[in-house]
Amino acid sequence: MKGNKALSMLSIAAKAGKVKSGGFLVEKALQENNAQLVLIAKDASDNTKKKFKQKCEFYKIPYYTSVNSELLGKSIGKEARVVVVVTDAGLANQIVNGINSSKDLEV
């Protein structure tokens, strides 16, 4: 995580209470139109990746396939997580800016 702006901003968003993790909470945020950005772990199952990519496309929410689930969870102060959602637009934009300047995360 050291030197990775996107994961650092994700950590700040989590501390601010603007991140939810886990399939159920991410789905709920998408359905309630609270989601601003979804990050999916690159080691998530193919079904999980497909499910959340389709939901994000349906609700027109940007999504990225990111680092492994352990690092994704660690960056929000939890155990391994395969999917997280950011609910604040400003923090989501900062994370996207970090993703665009990093080679670790991809669309």
Image (spheres, grey):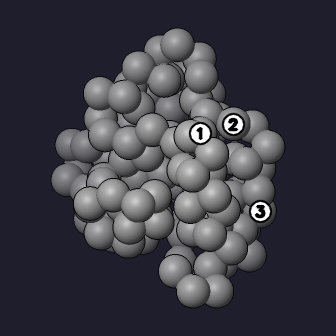
Q: Residue furthest top?
A: 32
Residue 90, compared with residue 54, is above or below; it is: below
Dot in front, 1 or 3: 1
Looking at the image, tell me whether mark 2 or mark 1 is earlier in sequence order: 1
Residue 82, compared with residue 20, is above or below; it is: below
Any part of residue 53 in sight? no
CA gap, disc 2 to disc 1?
Answer: 6 Å
User: Is 94 left, or right, of 6 in this rendering?
Assistant: right
**92 or 100: nearer the viewer:** 92
User: Callout 2 environment at 10 Å: few (<14), some (14 to 19), or many (20+)?
Assistant: some
Any part of residue 83 in sight? yes
In the picture, the disc for residue 67 is none
Percent position (x, y) of residue 56?
Answer: 50, 32
Q: Which residue is mark 3?
A: 97
Q: Secondary structure at mark 2?
A: loop
CA gap, disc 2 to disc 3?
Answer: 14 Å
Residue flagged by tag 3: what amino acid is it? Asn
Percent position (x, y) of residue 48?
Answer: 26, 43
Question: Which residue is rendered at x = 62% and y = 79% of the image?
Answer: 4
Numbered marks: total: 3
Q: Secondary structure at mark 1?
A: loop
Q: Which residue is mark 1?
A: 18
Question: Which residue is rendered at x = 20% and y = 53% of the image?
Answer: 45
Residue flagged by tag 1: what amino acid is it? Lys
User: Callout 1 environment at 10 Å: few (<14), some (14 to 19), or many (20+)?
Assistant: some
User: Is 52 left, or right, of 47 in this rendering?
Assistant: right
Question: Which residue is rendered at x = 41% and y = 52% of the image?
Answer: 40
Q: Which residue is mark 2?
A: 88
Question: Which residue is rendered at x = 59% and y = 39% of the image?
Answer: 18
Q: Are marks 2 and 1 in contact (CB under 8 Å)?
A: yes
